Amino acid sequence: MRAKLNDQTDEAGVLQRLNPVSKLLAITPAMGVLMLVTDPYTPLAFVAFGALVTIVLGRLSPVDYLRVAGPLVALAASFLFVYPFVVGSSAGTSSDVFASLGPLAVRESGLRVGVATGLRILALSILSLLFVLTTETESFLRALVQNLGLPYRIGYSAIAAFRFAPKMRSDVETIRAAHTVRGTPDTDSLRDRLHRMSRYAIPLFVNAIRRAERTALAMDARAFGAYDERTHYRTYSITSADITFVVFFWTLSVGIVLTLWYLEALGTLTILR
Amino acid sequence: MSQIQTHELRFRYRGHREWKPSCVSLDIDTGEFVLLLGPSGSGKSTLARCFNGLIPHSVPGELRGTIKISGRDVTETSQADLAKQVGLVFQNPSLQFVTSTVETEIAFGLENLQVQTSEISKRIANALDTVGLSGLESRQIDTLSGGEKQRLAIACQLAMEPEILVLDEPTANLDPRGTEAIYGLLRKLSRDESRTIVLLEHQCESLIDAVDRTLVLDSDGDLFLDGTPETVFGENPRRLRREGIWIPAATRLALELRSSGAWPGSTSLPVTVDQATDTLKDVLTKQRSREPWCDSQPSDGGSQPENSTSLSDRSVVRPDGATEQEPGDGATKSPALDICGLNARYGTDEKSNPVLKDVELSVPEGSFLALVGPNGAGKSTLAKHCIGVRSLPPETVFIDGRDVTTLPSREVSQKVGYVFQNPEYQFVTDSVWDELAYGLRQLDFDADEIEHRVQQTLERFNLTGYADRNPFTLSHGEKRRLSVATMLVVGQDILIVDEPTYGQDRANADALMETLSELHEVGRTVIVLTHDMRIIAEHADTVAVLVDGEVQFHGTPSDLFEDPETLSAAHLSRPPLAELADGLSGFSGPATLDRCYEHCTGEQTKPPTSDHDATFSSALDYGEER
C-alpha cells in the first residue's frame, strides 16, 4: 500500500514531485508551534489543515489515507483515557470532578490536558504523514546529500541499508517455518516464546551481517567513496515550485495561529509558563 | 599483451590459517575468455576479488606474491582506478544493488567516478542496449526477474567501461532460461577482442564452446590445470573427477565409450556436443555394419554397483516399513501427499494476485517428484503448504490420506521433512550432535536410542568429526549435509528438498543427490524443487511443472522432454545431451548419459566404473539404472 502512495509517476500529486527537503522545511515551524501549545483548538486546526493538504496536493485517495491515519487517531484517543487518571491528582486538585467511580475520580482539568495532549500527538503525526506518505526514503536521502550537505558516504550507505528491511522480514517468516518443520513445539508460554526469539536471532543476524558485508564489497567494487565528491545523475534542487509551496504552507500556518489568537482560543504556550 | 598477471599469489583472510588461493601464477591475455573452475572453498572468489583490488584494499587479510593488472601492481593502484579497469559481477544479484531503480543503479558507479550527467545518460542507454534491457530505465529493481537483475548487474559494470569483466557464479541463482540469457550475453561480449572475461562457475555446459581457456583450482587453492577446454577436460578427466569438478557431458560420454572401446582411441575427447556428434555418428555407422543385430544384453537390474553400501544404509535409515507406523489399512493405499484444489495468495489481501490457482497434485508413496517451474511460479509456496506452516482451508492437502489442517504441527513434522535452501535457518541448537538429537528428543526417544541413531547418522553423513562443532561454523556443504541429516534422523516418509544443488559444487551436489536416490530406493517419497535438468533427467520418476501458480504438466520426465512448449513455459532447457541425441539416428526418450551410452554401444548396459571415489561417488556419472 505504501508503494502505491509513494507512486512517483506523472499522475502523482504536487507533493510527490517536490524536493523532500522543502517539504521538511514547510512542516517544521508548524511542528515547533504544536510542541508548545496547550489548548485543544490549535492541534485540531492543524490536523484538518495537514490532512487536507496531504490529500489534495498529494492526490491520495481519502480511503487509503484514513487507513493509515486511523491507528494514529486511536493512539491519540488512548491519551484521553489515560491522562485524567495520571494528571488528576497533582494538577487538578482544585478543578471539578467530572465523573467518579469508587476511589477513581476523573477531573475536568485532567480531561482537558488529556484531550490537548492527544490532539497534539495526532497533529504532529498528521504533519509527518504529509512528508512520509509522499516521499521515498531514497529521494529524501539523495536530497539531504545534495541540498543539506549530508556526507554522501553516509547518505548512500543509508540508502543501501534501507533495502535490507523487507528482506529481514521475509527472513523471519522463513526461519519460523524452518523451525516449525524441525518440530519446535509451538506452545505459547512466555519462556518458550523468548527462547524461540533467541533462536531466530542467530541466523537472522548472521545473514544480515553477511548481506551487509557483500553489499559493502559490491559498493567498493564500484568505486564507492573513491573521491570526496561525486556527480549526481538525478539532481535535487530547490525550484520555484518548492519555494511557492514552502511560502504557502508557512503563510497558512501563521494564519491559523493568528486567527486562533485573535479569537482568544490560543492558550498559553508551555515554554512561557 | 598480458592483462592479468599473478606470480605466486596467495591470500589468507584475517583470522584464518590456510592460504587460499595458495601460490597461483597465471597470465591472462587481452581478449581471452577464461573459465575458472574449482570446488567450493578453493579460493576462486578470493582470486576474483584480487583481480579488482577488493583484496587487499577492502578485505582484511594477508597478501603474498604479486598481482598486476595491465602491468600495474594492484597493491599500488587505487581502488577507483581498478574499478574502472576491472568490473566484478557477484553471485547474488540483489546484494549488489544500492538504489531502487534501474537507471539510478547504473548511474551509481559512474557518479562515484565523477562522470558528468550527460555522459552518464549516454552510458546508461548503451549499457542497457547491450544487455537487452532497453526500455526498463525507470523500473523498480525489485520487480525484475532474477535473470534481468543479473543482466542489470552486468550492465552496471559495462557502463564503467572496464577492460576486464569478472563474473563470480553469475547464474547460481537463476532458472535455466535466465542462465541461457546470461550465457548468450557473455557469448556476445566475448566476441569483442578488446575485452577480457573471467567467468567463475561450477559448470557451464552450454557456453563451453565459447571458452578460450580453462583454469582449474584444486581444493588446496593451487592452480592445477591451465589450458584450452580440450586439453583440460580431454587429458585430465581423472584428476578433475577426483577434485569433484564438473566435466562437460559430451566429454563424460566419450570417456565412458572409450573405456569400453567404442570411442576410437585416435580421436581426442570432445568438449562440445558438436565435436562429439560427428565422431559418434561414425561410431554408430561402423557398429551397425559390424553387428546388424545389436543383441541387447538384457539389463536385468542385477548389475547395480551400489547395492553393497546402500543395503547397509537402508537398515540404518529405516527400521523398515513393516515394524513402524500404525497397522494401516494396506488395501486402500492413499497417496503420500494429495493436494486437491489448493488456492493461495500472498498475505491476506483479497486484491493480491493468486500465487496458486486450483492446484491438483497427487504424489504416490515412494515416488521421486521434481517440482519445477520458473522463479516465482509458486513452487516454494506450494511446498510450504504441504508442511502446514501456512494456514490453508480444510480438505485441500492430505498426508497419507489425512487432512493436514486436522494434524498437530508436531505430527506433520514427523511425517514430512523439509530441507530449506538456506540450511542455517533450520538450526535450533548449538552443536551438531544436539542438532541431530533434537528431533528425536521431540519424539521422546530414550537416551540410548538417541545416542545410537545420532552416531549412525553422523557416520552416514561424514560428520563424525564435527559432533561438537557449532552448526554455524561448518562450511556450506557441511551445513547442507547436516540439514538433510537432521531431517532423516527422525525418519519421515516424505522428504521435500528445496533446490538441492543450489550454490554447491559438483561433488557436494552429487553426494546429496546420491543420498536422495538411496532414500527413494528404500521407498521414501522424495520431492525436490529444482531447475536442474540433470536431476529431472537422471533422478526423478515424475515431474510436475508449475507455471503462474497452475500445474501445467504432470507426467514422466521423458514426456516432458518431448514437449518443447511446456519446457519453454517452465523456463527449462533440455538436458545437455539432448542436442547430441537429436543427431543420433534412432534415439528416443530422455537423453541421459547412460541411455546415450547404451545407444552408442548397441544397448549394452554401462558397466560400473572402477575409479570410484568413495566419498563423492557420483550417481550421475556411474549410474544406477532404474
Image: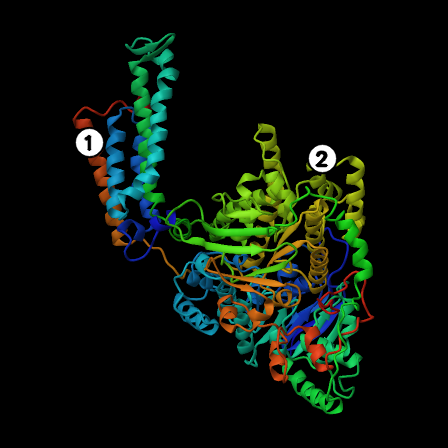
Characterize the local packing of mark 2: few (<14), some (14-19) or many (20 or more) Cα atoms within 10 angstroms: few
Furthest residue in direction front, as rendered:
B331
Give the x, y percent position of residue A190.
Answer: 57, 28
The residue closer to the viewer here, B54 or B197, is B197
Q: Are marks 1 and 2 in contact (CB under 8 Å)?
A: no
Residue holding disc 2:
B444
**Subunit of label 1:** A
In this view, the mark in front (1 or 2): 2
Of residue B557 and residue A63, the one placed in the foreground of this image is: B557
**x then y, percent, for residue B182:** 54, 70
In the image shown, does A124 or B625 lie closer to the viewer?
B625
Image quadrant holding the C terminus of chain A, namely top left
Residue at screen point 67% across, 83% down: B276
The percent position of residue A55, horizontal first and vertical second, equals 26, 44
Q: CA distance from mark 1 to mark 2?
A: 75 Å
- Of all residues shown, which one is farthest toward the left? A263
Mark 1 highlights which residue? A258
Q: Position of residue B346 (x, y in %)?
A: 45, 49
Image position of B188 (left or right of B258): left
Q: Chain of mark 2?
A: B
Q: Amino acid at mark 2?
A: Asp
User: Element under label 2?
Assistant: loop
Q: Is residue B7 visible?
A: no
Q: Are marks 1 and 2 on the same chain?
A: no
Figure check: A38 above or below B512 = above
Q: Which mark is residue A173?
A: none
Is A17 on the left-hand or right-hand side of B268?
Answer: left
Q: Residues within 10 Å of mark 1 (few under 14, many from 20)?
A: few
**Can residue A116 be spotted in the picture?**
yes
Q: Secondary structure at mark 1?
A: helix
- Pick the front one: B141 or B493: B493
Q: Is residue B393 above or below residue A12?
A: above
